[in-house]
Amino acid sequence: MAAIATTYEVVIGIEVHAQLLTKSKMFCSCSKDYFGSPANSHVCPVCLALPGVLPVINRQAVEYTIMTGLALHCTIPEQAKFDRKNYHYPDLMKGYQISQYDLPLCLDGWLEVDLDGETKRIGVTRVHLEEDTARSMHRSNAAGEKYSLIDVNRSGVPLMEIVSEPDVRSAKEARLYVMKIQQILRYLGVSQANLEEGNMRCEPNVSLRPLGQEEFGSKVELKNLGSFRAVERAVQFEIERQSKLLDNGEPVEQETRGWRDDRGVTVSQRGKELAEDYRYFPEPDLPLLAIKPAYVEELRARLPELPDAKRVRIAKQYGLSPYNANLLTETGEWADYYERAVAVDPGEGDVTARRAKTIANWMLQDFAHIVNSQEATFAGLTEKVPAQQLNQLVQLIEADTISTSGAKSVFAEMVSSGKPPQQIVEEQGLTQISASDEIASMVDQVIEANPDPVADYRGGKEAAIEFLVGQVMRETRGRAKPELVQKLLQERLSSGE
Ligand code: ADP
Ligand code: MG
Ligand code: ZN
């Protein structure tokens, strides 16, 4: 593959569509939460496109789109317009889609992705608002005859489109871009942004050009990408397919290709219509939108802290590594929980920084393990272990009430029973034995019972002490501090006898 990198430059621009988390559809009052509902149960004359109906703009959808534009550093022009985009597909009830053509809600923004430690900025051309289509389902009957069904529930659901500049240069970068969009949309709470469920969809446009050539090659638009992994694989496949064509002196057709995840290939779906074919014209049933700057500023003030800013602040404020801060801010839920867990009792002086780090480690190791192994969702887990109780667990370790290994079993019990840590420690008698007297007698017993390892140790095999520490820990059922046990053993064993 090295030959590709030196011969051609990869050029990718990405279109992302996201359904918005409004209550109703874009131009009617039907509920847009059709997921799991019977087919054609969320419909009305407007989204069915019966004659004589008029659309009404969903204000929430406009606000969500502007908020997204602001989060992506876009300019919000003072005038926006809806247009008709005409095309004839059975799933397009009106025979046109209400979209935005030359006056979109948001223009000229960017986002940044972390590419192997380097920050790469990717331009966002525009963010606009449109409506989703109905869904065709292709079937065949017992006789093998093909037929199609149509479900109109999705028709008219608010759909936001984010179009990138052709700034993306690799399959991996394409995946990172789409992941970043998902993260931002989720932080904003404007979309579920789930590729697998189809409420977010992305279409990378891929072309190659000989290195040094200014003019773009002809592009291929990729569809049917149901996961981040599919995004990366499909783009990589397409880069390789196109480079082989170009190597052989064959042209790359401008077309739309669908990704077949099971076969790991893209297949031609249709030649791409040119933009003029859509015969865009202003939607006569809707007014121009005047977007007042003061209104935009109001929305800007309502934006939550966004992932990049939160990551930098959390690293600084709690003394975490950039890596850990990045993991903790992957979702707003993790970051919020973390900050609450620290804030309920940050401790004083030297304790503060240590406690903040220990809490982060519990989340990144123990929480992550549970969530990644799908033992529980983050929401389910944190219902059992509220932020305050994680803080308390950490304090029990700090106070030497329980050992770190004891804390692991307390934590497991917290997760399964939802009990607070102190209660578990008391019920199970897990309080760490800190009085050296009590441990000392067990140390004596273990020395007595294990003459061989004792002799080994005295004979210079220092590692033999590990075994003896283990024996004492077993006697105490893990309730002693290993460092203390080791210290007592060393004292006893070096005092001769
Ligand atoms: P279309 O009208 O075919 O949808 P657009 O001009 O709207 O094309 O661009 C769609 C997306 O394709 C944008 O993200 C844009 O950056 C990207 N794009 C345009 N030309 C190319 C190209 N030659 N190679 C790769 N991406 C491209
Ligand atoms: Mg386009
Ligand atoms: Zn409707």
Image: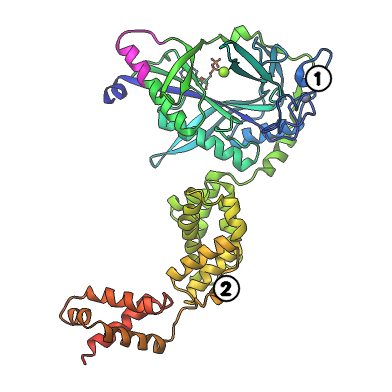
Looking at the image, which is closer to me, 149 or 210? 149
Q: In x, y percent, where is residue 270?
A: 51, 11
Q: Is residue 176 above or below residue 263?
A: below
Looking at the image, which is closer to me, 4 or 50? 50
Q: Is residue 119 left or right of residue 416?
A: left
Q: In x, y percent, where is residue 168?
A: 45, 27
Q: Which residue is mark 2?
A: 422
Q: Is residue 378 above or below residue 266?
A: below
Q: Which residue is mark 1?
A: 45
Q: In x, y percent, where is residue 177?
A: 49, 33
Residue type, numbered disc 2: Gln
Q: Is residue 304 left or right of residue 269?
A: right
Quadrant containing the N terminus in the rendered view: top left
Is there any visible trace of residue 287 in the rendered image? no
Looking at the image, which is closer to me, 291 or 420? 420
Any atom of ligand 3 within 8 Å of the CB at mark 1?
Answer: yes
Residue type, numbered disc 1: Pro
Quadrant containing the C terminus in the rendered view: bottom left
Q: Which residues are magenta?
A: 240-252
Is there any visible trace of residue 97 in the rendered image? yes
Q: Is residue 182 above or below residue 309?
A: above
Density class for disc 2 (Cα within 10 Å; few <14, some 14-19, many ≥20) is some
Secondary element at image label 1: helix
Secondary element at image label 2: helix
Tell me which numbered mark, 1 or 2, is placed earlier along the sequence: 1
Q: Is residue 300 above or below residue 96?
A: below
Q: Tell which residue pokes out farthest to the front in this image.
A: 142
Looking at the image, which is closer to me, 287 or 187? 187
Residue located 18% across and 82% down the image: 455
